[in-house]
Image (cartoon, grey):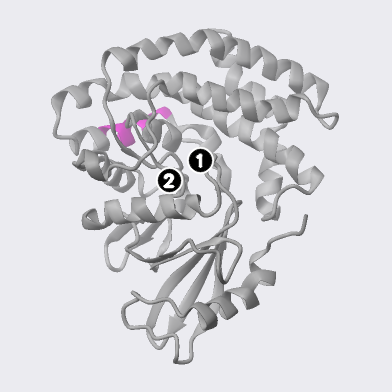
Amino acid sequence: MFDLSIQTFLPQAVQYLQEAQPTGIPNWRADRPFEVTPLAQGEYNLNFLVGQGNFHWVLRVNSRSEIGLSNPDQITYEYQTLALLAPSGVAPQPYFLDASLTHLPYGVLGMAYCPGEFLDYRRDLSAAAQLMARYHQLQIPPEKNHLIREVHPLTQTLTHCQEMLSVYLESDLADPDLSAYLREVLDWAETARQRETYFLRDPWQCVINTDVNNTNWILNRTAGTIHLVDWDKPMWGDPSHDLSHFRVPTTTLWKTDQRLTAEDQARMMAAYQAAIADPHLRDTIEERTRLRDPFNCLRAVAWSAMAWVQYQRGEHLVKNPDTFRKFQLYTDLSFVRSIFDPYLQS
């Protein structure tokens, strides 16, 4: 299996635009000179900045799905989500979808470019909380809701973690001590997931992003705008998913060296509650989020352990050196113990 890197794929991105000549992009014509430069590379997506004069937009190429969708269903799912969110202004505007696989063996979409900088946990907690509150309160007509449902939140997360961790636990590359500890964590989570009766007795369903790490937020401080730009695995589920994922250390440490203090978390949650209209959600959101925290941590560790093995085997099309270094941290026994010992010992 070959590596799919943003630099080596650049000529194919240029050729795609020349051949496919996508439409629906304001202020852009494929028959005029344009420039394409690498913008960002994730584990499953390559993002290119396309420029023509003073106008820029993003070409996004998807290589794989993290939520079990086939190619090109994954890129279609993301495009439909961006279209759903378009009136709210919380995400980039979608321009076009190409799920034909005619010019590339991958799904492609075009979307607006949101210039700015990544979220800073020291400065932007309230702004992020307020934006989450905006899309969590969107009214979505049932006939337009294509999102995958999160019905049993803790069980679904645990099942996904078990599937991912099996790759690591069954690998001859695994550290035996870490494997033994991860089995203890899974045993604890099997019992703790019974607490999801809380969500079943008091369901609250809305659009959730599920991947709110700081590099998926773009803030333009000059224009005073904030956008959440990565929507490849959203769901229809409990808002606590995003709030928990945003605040747990396995998220904040993913691209930074920061952990949110108790005071940081309280400030973030207070900003969210102040932006929520429904009094019941305001009153219950902290408890909902607290129940999710260890499961979101487990999801991050499980995915990292699985991906760490896949990297060794050459099974990832997209390879990111910084991400691999984070996999190594998240599969370090002392780090994993620092996350889960408080739960196992409580």
- Give above or below for 151 relative to 321: above
Determine the image quadrant of residue 138.
top left
Q: Residues within 10 Å of mark 2 (few under 14, many from 20)?
A: some
Instruction: Tell me the mark number nearer the camera, choosing from 1 and 2.
Output: 1
Judged by its main secondary structure, the magenta piece is helix
Q: Is residue 336 visible?
A: yes
What residue lies at 46% left-to-right and 49% top-to-bottom? 232
Identify the residue position indicated by label 2 in the image: 121
Q: CA distance from mark 1 to mark 2?
A: 8 Å
Identify the residue position indicated by label 1 in the image: 252
Disc 1 residue type?
A: Thr
Left or right: where 161 falls relative to 217: right
Q: Residues within 10 Å of mark 1 (few under 14, many from 20)?
A: many
- Give above or below for 177 relative to 263: above
- Outermost residue toward the right? 172
Residues shaded magenta: 262-270
Could you say where residue 7 lies in the image, as x and y percent from the top left?
Answer: 66, 70
Residue 124's mark? Answer: none
Disc 2 residue type?
A: Tyr
Determine the image quadrant of residue 13.
bottom right
Tell me the element at label 1: helix
Whether the magenta-drawn stretch holds residue 264 is answered as yes
- Give above or below for 19 relative to 207: below
First in residue order: circle 1 vs circle 2: 2
Count of numbered circles in the view: 2
Could you say where residue 269 lies in the image, as x and y percent from the top left?
Answer: 30, 32
Left or right: where 189 falls relative to 91: right
